[in-house]
Image (cartoon, rainbow, N blue to C red):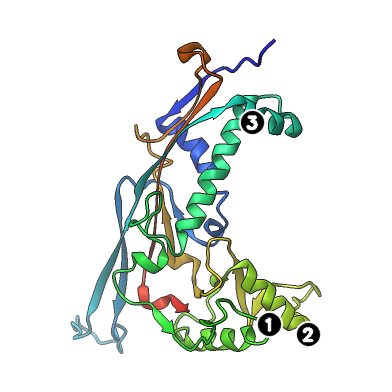
Amino acid sequence: MGLTITSSTYAGSQAGAYLSAALKGADSLEYATVRDAVNYKEVINTMTNSSLVKDATCGFDEQSSTLTMTENVLEVEQFQINQDICRKTLLSDWSYAQEDDFVAFVMAYSASVIADSIEGSFWEGTTATSGQFNGVRNSLTGSMTTDASAGIAAAGFYSPSDVVGELQNLIAAVPAAVYGKDDLYIYMSKRTYRAYIAAISALNAFPMNHMGQYTPDFQGVKIAVVSGLSDLAMFAGCKSNLFFGTSTKLDMDFNEVAVLDMSGVDGSQNVRLISRWTAGVQVGVDADFTYQS
């Protein structure tokens, strides 16, 4: 007796709930501010001022100081998966996973593909490549604070012998108004983090919290280890200044998740996997994000 598959299709807000869980599989979203009701674009407004606070007077004394509103636009791109998968290809993995529901297993596979796609675009993606959105490096309309001191181009990655010095350079380039904020992170790849661990192991200098537990940080700044960042770069910035946008909370027709059994349609042994979602990333204040490469 063959495997019976019940086709499942979700659209709009129903698909959004599934897609939201799928997107959260991307490492970097843990360290970003997620806006999950972005239709196509959302304006991120930031106010800056110059000496608004003055000594008090008895009357209304209009000040010459200026209140400046700046904005960056968080724009989401539309993506899809349209894939025929032979059920024979997945049956062995499904049996090994001991999942009761084959459709749930296929949808979990789809979720991992979506999460990997998001992570792959988040930092250095470009819309010039199909299936990617502009990552942090390519989405800014202004200029990040840049630390150009890193001497790693020849090797192609940070090593235990240079990573501590380069982290010091990165932290030194962080704007004074940003340094010390609770949600400030250093973003680095897994390979860079391994180099950092090797370096502090050699120095016997593991940072410990008040409970005597190891905490991943450098000079008091928390470290976020993310899969999507290359081994040639590090960033420093606040979670509250880094935005990821998607439409998973909106009842949009574009949100779709479907697993279709094609055996009754064309006689094949294929399972058709369909997913549609939106994604994009933006920084609120460009100059408050620091980049080293």
Residue at 57% in and 27% down: 86
Instruction: Tell me, for residue 140, which label it has, or none.
Output: none
Does residue 71 appear anywhere in the picture?
A: yes
Residue at position x 49%, y 61% from top? 32
Pinpoint residue 131: horizontal percent, then vertical percent: 40, 49
Local packing at callout 2 (Cα closer than 10 Å; few below 14, some 14-19, many 20+) is few
State how many labels appear: 3
Q: How far apart are the two marked residues, 2 and 3, measured between alpha carbons? A: 45 Å
| Mark 1 or mark 3: whose residue is earlier in sequence | 3
Q: Is label 1 or label 3 in front?
A: 3
Q: Name the N-terminal-most of marks 2 and 3.
A: 3
Q: Is residue 207 above or below residue 111?
A: below
Quick check: 228 above or below 114?
below
Q: Nearer the viewer, mark 2 or mark 3?
A: 3
Quadrant of residue 231 within the rendered picture: bottom right
Between 60 and 179, the residue placed more toward the observer is: 179
Q: Amino acid at mark 1?
A: Pro
Q: Which residue is mark 1?
A: 160
Q: Secondary structure at mark 2?
A: helix
Q: Nearer the viewer, residue 285 or 268?
A: 268
State if disc 1 and disc 2 touch (CB < 8 Å): yes
Disc 3 marks which residue?
Answer: 90
| Percent coordinates x, y for residue 63 in the rendering | 20, 84
